[in-house]
Amino acid sequence: MEAAEMEVDEKDEQQPQRGRRRLPETSTSTMNNSSSSSPTTKRFGLRNTIQTNFGDGYVFQISTREDLTEMAVSLSTNVVKLYSPETGHYLGECRGHGATINQISFSGPTSVLHSCSSDGTIRAWDTRTFHQVSSVNAGPCQEVFTFSFGGSGDLLAGGCKSQILFWDWRNLKQIACLEECHVDDVTQVHFIPGAQNKLLSASVDGLMCIFDTARDINDDEHLESVMNVGTSIGKVGFFGDKREKLWCLTHIETLSVWDWKNSKLEVDFQEARSLASDNWSRDHVDYLVDCHCSGDDGNDLWVIGGTNAGTIGYFPVNYNGTAAIYSPDAILEGGHTGVVRTVLPTSNMALNTRCHGIFGWTGGEDGRLCCWRSDEISDMSRSWISSWLVMKSPKALKKKRHQHQPY
């Protein structure tokens, strides 16, 4: 049986305006942080779904090339599958990791995909052939939870248990190790956009650290600042016109916003799920998936929250003045039957000339990839699913959503 194509019409839900900008393609008006007229919440249509496997596996992460010609999907079966984000067609898969794949990322507009795993390796794949082309190994009994490329593009940082390892990607040799700043698993490393010699790390120990990697890297001289979140950190990201702001999601579902240059906490939402739940009529928000930033100056921030039944919403965050989480600018429902793990928006990508009418993709613990439309387009009935990609009822998933648990 072929996977059925699902269509959900867009519906508007009147919500009180509390002064914030809209998501791209949800409204033609722009707003500032003051009161204005009532907006509408967009409920995006589900254009199609793809079942990624036939077992208990589920989707960890979706990543795309800058030119939107390929979309990589990491699965709990330790495989990365490739699809066309424009058509949904299956392209192939990359196999080789022997344990959980913790992060995937394309190298700019090229066909090189990088992945890291709890098998202790960071690997590069040529997605034209689906073959591995290079790799580095963090050593025996190591797990690599996160990685980032910085410097001139050849410096690779990886979060490995409580250490941060550095390699020269040109010769694949390890050149440094930071092991005194964190005492638990390093869950995030990011070279800061616009300041590629500066590295931010985040850990289960609740600390975020900024390092200067411009010279010889060591614990003693290159730690610039430390920010204490106070609980296990899951995801972080940069936003603002100069990428001077930092959002942080924790494993106990809290949200905070920081000025990383001054190590200053700007707002701390300890009850982010409750605040979001109070602003929509769906089930209680059970978890926070990610954050999304947009706007002409990059200062607009949304937190993406979801229910265990698979509905997610884009909730605007006000971090200036009175801190608040508002009613959702977008609701995506009817596609997933379980926890949503990853969200890939495409509607506001700079190079989005291929995926016209597509708001984005989501993946979850039901093993599904869902594509969401952002407007009415003529070929809505066209199937995106190959005949052998059949949909089966997902089995009950007993695995925990977070690999790292708060202490």
Image (cartoon, grey):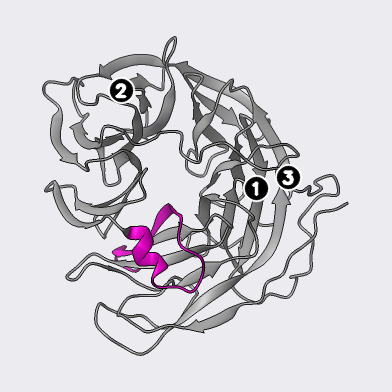
> Which is closer to the viewer, label 2 or label 3?
2
| Location of residue 32 by image quarter | bottom left
Question: With respect to residue 381, does 143 lie above or below?
Answer: above
Q: Earlier in the sequence, mark 1 or mark 3?
A: 3
Q: Residues within 10 Å of mark 2 (few under 14, many from 20)?
A: many
Label 1 sits on a secondary structure element that is: loop
Q: Amino acid at mark 1?
A: Asp
Q: Residue 62 or 76: which is nearer the viewer?
A: 76
Residue 206 screen position, x and y as percent = 25, 37
- Position of residue 317 relative to residue 195, above or below, is below
Q: Which residue is mark 1?
A: 366
First to last magenta residue range? 272-301
Mark 1 and mark 2: Cα distance apart in space? 31 Å
**Residue shown at 85% from the left, 53% from the top:** 2
Residue at mark 2: 162
Quarter of the image that includes the C terminus: top left
**In the image, is residue 218 above or below residue 313?**
above
Q: Is residue 11 in the magenta section?
A: no
Residue 333 on image: x %, y %: 59, 65
Tell me the mark number nearer the camera, choosing from 1 and 3. Answer: 1
Residue 90: image tag: 3
Tell me which label, 2 or 3, sits earlier in the chain: 3
Task: Name the residue furthest bottom.
Answer: 37
Amino acid on which disc 3 is placed: Tyr
The residue shown at (18%, 32%) is: 212
Separation (CA) of disc 1 from disc 3: 18 Å
Mark 1, Cα crowd under 10 Å, few <14 / some 14-19 / many 20+, is many
What residue is at 35 percent from the left and 72 percent from the top?
326
Circles 1 and 2 in contact, beta carbons < 8 Å: no
Dot label at residue 41 = none
